[in-house]
Amino acid sequence: MLGEEDELLAYFPEAKEVIFELKSKISQAYTDLLEVWAEHKDIQDQKEFALKVKGVPFSGILFSLRKQHGQNQSIDDFKRAWRASEPAILSYLKRKGF
């Protein structure tokens, strides 16, 4: 998630396909969550917000952002929260069969 696949591939070139597949899945998950965030971040009512995002993968990131920043969330806040969630993201992808 830090974009250091070149270094990893220098040591394990046979992992190229797996690394790029994982990178693609992470990128898609980021894009999907960013869309959900943009669509629902401004909902004022907490219950309504929760109902809209509760079934979304990585919704915990959205709940954390809301708790920390309320409706004053920025895209930079979203990016920092995403990067800080690397262990949970990788764990989720692993559970989903990657």
Image (spheres, helix red, strand yellow):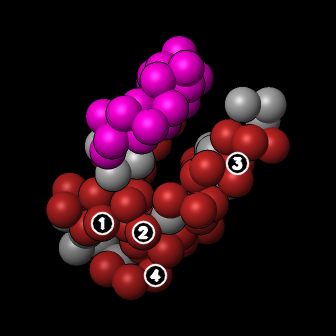
Element under disc 4: helix
In the displayed structure, 49 sits above or below 34; it is: below
Q: Which sits earlier in the primary sequence, circle 3 or circle 1? A: 1
Element under disc 2: helix
Circle 3 sits on which residue? 92
Label 3 vs label 2: CA separation? Answer: 14 Å
Number of the front mark, 4 or 3: 3
Where's residue 63, x and y in %? 53, 69
Label 3 vs label 1: CA separation? Answer: 18 Å
Q: Which mark is residue 67?
A: 4
Left/right of residue 86 with respect to residue 59 in the rendered view: left
**Do callouts 4 and 1 mark residues in contact (Cβ within 8 Å)?**
no
Q: Which mark is residue 80?
A: 1
Element under disc 1: helix
Q: Residue at (30%, 34%) from the top-left corner?
A: 6
Left/right of residue 32 with respect to residue 22 in the rendered view: left
Q: Is residue 30 visible?
A: no
Q: Residue at (74%, 42%) from the top-left corner?
A: 94
Tag 2: Cα neighbours inside 10 Å, few (<14), some, or many (≥20)? few
Q: Tell me the kind of residue under disc 2.
A: Ala
Which residue of the protein is positioned furthest toward the top in this rendering? 17
The answer to whether residue 23 is magenta is: yes
**Do callouts 1 and 2 mark residues in contact (Cβ within 8 Å)?**
yes
Circle 2 sits on which residue? 84
Left/right of residue 84 with respect to residue 53 in the rendered view: left
Label 1 vs label 2: CA separation? Answer: 6 Å
Q: Tell me the kind of residue under disc 1.
A: Arg
